[in-house]
Amino acid sequence: MAYISLYRKWRPQTFAEAIGQEHIVQTLTNALETGRVAHAYLFSGPRGTGKTSFARLLAKGLNCVHGPTGTPCNECDNCIRITRGISVDVIEIDGASNRGIDEIRELRERVKYAPIEGRHKVYIIDEVHMLTNEAFNALLKVLEEPPEHVNFVFATTEAHKVPATILSRCQKFDFRRFSTAQLMYQLEKVSKSEGVEAEPQALALIARHAEGGMRDALAILDQCVAANGQSLSVSGVTKVLGVVRREALADLAQHILDRNLAGGLKLIHALIDEGVETRQLLKDLSAYMRDLVLLKAAPGESNLVAAEGVYLEKMQEQVRQVPLEQLLPVVDTLTRAETEMRWSTNPALAIELTLVKTTAQMAESKTSSPEVDGAIKALEQRVARLEEILRRGAVSQSETRAAAPSKPVPSTGPAHVERSAPAHTMPMSGSAPPYEEATQRQATRVKPAQSAQPVHSARPAHSAQSAQSSQSRTVVGSAADMELLHTIKSMWPDLLATLKKERYITLEAFLRVGTPGQVQGKTLVVYFTPTHRFHQANVEDPKHRTIIEQMIKRLIGRDISIATATGAPPAQILAPDAKAADADRPDAATTEAAKMDATKMNAGPVNAPARGLTSASSAAQSSAPSGKVPFGASTEGSLGGISDAPFGVAEAGNAPSSGLPSSKKADAMTPVLGNESAGKPAERAMPSTGPGEHVGEEPHDHVMPKDVFDASEAKVDTKTHDLDMTLSPPTADKQDIRQSPSVQKALHFFGGRIVEVRHD
Amino acid sequence: MPWDIAGHDAAVRSLQAALISGQIGHAYMFVGPKGIGKGRLALQTAKALMCELDKTQAPCGACRGCRRVESNNHPDLHRVMPEGTGVKIDQMRQLQDTLALRPYEAKYKVVIIDDADSLTVQAQNSMLKSFEEPSGDTVYILIVHNPDALLPTIHSRCQIIRLQPVADEVVAALLQKERGMDMDQATLLAALSDGRPGLALTLDAEQMLAQRKRVVEWCGALRQDGLKAVIRIGDTLEKDADLSESLTALSVWLRDLWHYNVDPHLQLVNRDMRDTIAQEAPFWRSGAVHALSAVAEAKNQLARNVNRRLVLDYMLIRIQRGLTL
């Protein structure tokens, strides 16, 4: 008789011998003892978990001369014959090779004959998932009501391939993978009985490699014994399995952490020469990295990691060297490489390139993180500084205002200086509404316009520059803006597709290179890279813009106007208090009382007087029509705010048409923050503020010059905005304002190309 | 006693140990890239099992049994080859029928399944029972290039023997013996064959050298002439009858350039051209890795029947662009 492999030799011969699967042992023995054995069972589970063995055990239990019993004797003729596989009453069918309807028909013919030796005929159909559909259906009747003496046992690794009609006729048992400890236990038992001296670590390695399959574990043991003789060491197992030595793996991981490409390559070559398989190497390496991630993420749970002793210590030391964010992309790359390697014709090259990628990832994150940290720190400092300035400024403002409201406030300190720096004009173009409408808008928002200036003026020039250079620009937006932006972004492809479908093919091409980057109120800012100036100009064409706006309205049912900007879109973040502001927004609800409240509250500490602001307020209070303020003031250059205004009103003079494009290009990269977003926090400061006097007419449609803005100054803007509210006459009559000639003139300048800002 | 095979000492030792102890598994899987010697090893194992000189544990190569295995004539040796695209379930059924019989003259029936990774899923499933508990004295040997193509249930039933690249010196010695090459040529071919003696034996030294010369010239041209070179090389490659070999040669060369840049002490394939590599390498400092990825991707796309010219042009442009980074 030829040599019988260990996994066959060590099949459990009694239920008691079976390791694991206690839930199934219990159920089956009980069924056998109480005579409640079902006529059909389906055993499913991964390879090497005991399905076939249990099927045979069940047959033995039924046919043992002492049975039906949960403890077959293994001594009677029936038991022995079943063990040897020669019992005529236990019919084991290979479902994968006898998978047709003809085989099943034959089976049906034979089922009716009574058993010869035992009490039951047991049909074991292994790999039942391979039966054809017809074969399954042919089984249905006999499976539902088989003759009394017949039991079916189906075994499969892929229960999902078995039709539901079969499943419902069977009792289904799910076999579980063995734990490493269970595999170890059995491996120890087997090796002891086989006279093999095995290092525990060697067995542990086998158990880990078997991945829960007892057959795998015993087959590997078999192979190791065959290759190494009766004593088994870790190195022997390592060789047979082609796995990578633990030390080598740790070294390789270290090379990646150190971004030592040359060292890594050398090690890989050495390992390949040593006989390590490349696939295995990649698999082990990604398992190792995964363990590092686990250790990092859950430092207390080192038992999750397949390492102990010195190896574990080494890993813990490595984990200390890197942050989690660096490890994750590496694991990601390795896992992807694992799947890609299946199709690779040159695995050695593939693993080398993977090494390059991972070391590069390490390098990237390692160099960039301090920079980012630094940038964040710098921003934090600046915010702190500005807050400080603001506080001081607020005090002095309130004081000065009490004394001489119409004079510039001298004590604005550094803010003052920063503010007066030349403006980086935001190239921004709004939709071109009909003149009438524009007039109306302009009129309704005169007060906000006035109030907005300090917002602009508060922007220190250097911050704008740094914002320009910084990659991660952010602007603050209200929750509604964010939501709208999200909506727009998700419908953007639809928009492009619709444009194309409707034959606006060129327009689609222009728009496609743009990125919807920001929403303020009802305006969407589309960003173009500086190389796409031509596209941008075309999108800005009023004719085109109207088409796009109509299209957007059709798609999301809202009036959105389009503006464009050059540069990468900033990340729009939620204003810290935008949510509450939003709650306030449902406009018309705001009452006169609320307005009053707001006014009262604002009358309190007046903050952050900008030079521009003060002159603006003085202008306003010297009974000049408020609409005029921005323009008049700006010409004097004292109004920092207006020189920040997008359209370079100050220098545009009488030639708005020429002024527009030039200013548009002036500062392509500067991030934008809507006054909207600036305005929001302001409202938070006075919770009950509502749309105020604008309610009736166009509560959401106040047009406001757009400003260049840096996130770090959000606070400043907030405060200055408060101030605006106070300064503007609370009872300003919009009708009057609208008709004022200066407003008309202003509107003419703006030509409607203004970003609208909701200022409610 | 040594087996008549180049390299694979570890595999041979473990098989020998099994023969000595009589613990011969019923199913083996020999895994490794094409041309590494899996077939050769399978044949040698069959010989060892069928050798009439007992107790040698290595095939004598002279007895009737060994000779008949060598000439594929042994009645107890069954070889299964893919029919069409793969090994079909009908072939397996046939096999099972013949295996039900006892061996004619040897102690074992040996089944060698070539390209076993091309077994269809049905065929694999149909063999599960046989692999698990074969009738009597059958030894299955599966020759597998890509083990992932086989079901895990097959894996767990086999003893897996992985064949590793053979050392260059061994391959060179083999080439000298078998093909009568001189030392230099043999060493070069051995290096180019990537540790695969079977491949080395089929390689044509002249052709390989010509191939390499072309590749070196291309790389130089891509560096100097830019896009003009792209078009010219694209023309040549498009008409290349053995495109995949040319691309392999290209990636071997690029890999040397890259390795030299990373660390000049890394072992190179084209050792004889170290000087040229040292000259060229600095220009490929950032370009080599890009180029390698481009070539690998192009190979992938060609395997999927993407327009040949487009793939090649794109690849060449990417290589060229990588150089200017």
Image: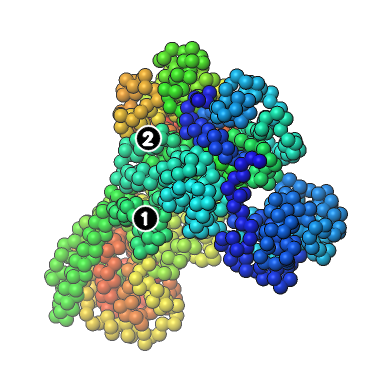
* Chain letter of the residue beneath label 2 in the structure image: A
Residue B224 sits in which quadrant?
top left
Which of A290 and B125 lies nearest the eye of the viewer? Answer: B125
Q: Secondary structure at mark 2?
A: helix
Task: Write the residue at 42% across / 45% down.
Answer: A233
In this picture, is A24 found above or below A312?
below
Q: Secondary structure at mark 1?
A: loop
Q: Label 2: which residue?
A: A270
What's the residue type where badge 2 is placed? Ala
Task: Write the residue at 61% across / 57% down.
Answer: A12
Of the residues under marks 2 and 1, which one precedes in the sequence? 2
* Chain letter of the residue beneath label 1 in the structure image: A
Estimate the spatial distance between the alpha carbons at disc 2 and disc 1, rounded to whole Å.
25 Å
Residue A113 sits in which quadrant?
bottom right
In this picture, is A684 found above or below B56?
below
B112 with respect to A206 (left or right): right
Which of A100 and B225 lies nearest the eye of the viewer? Answer: A100
Q: Label 1: which residue?
A: A308
| Figure label count | 2
What's the residue type where badge 1 is placed? Glu
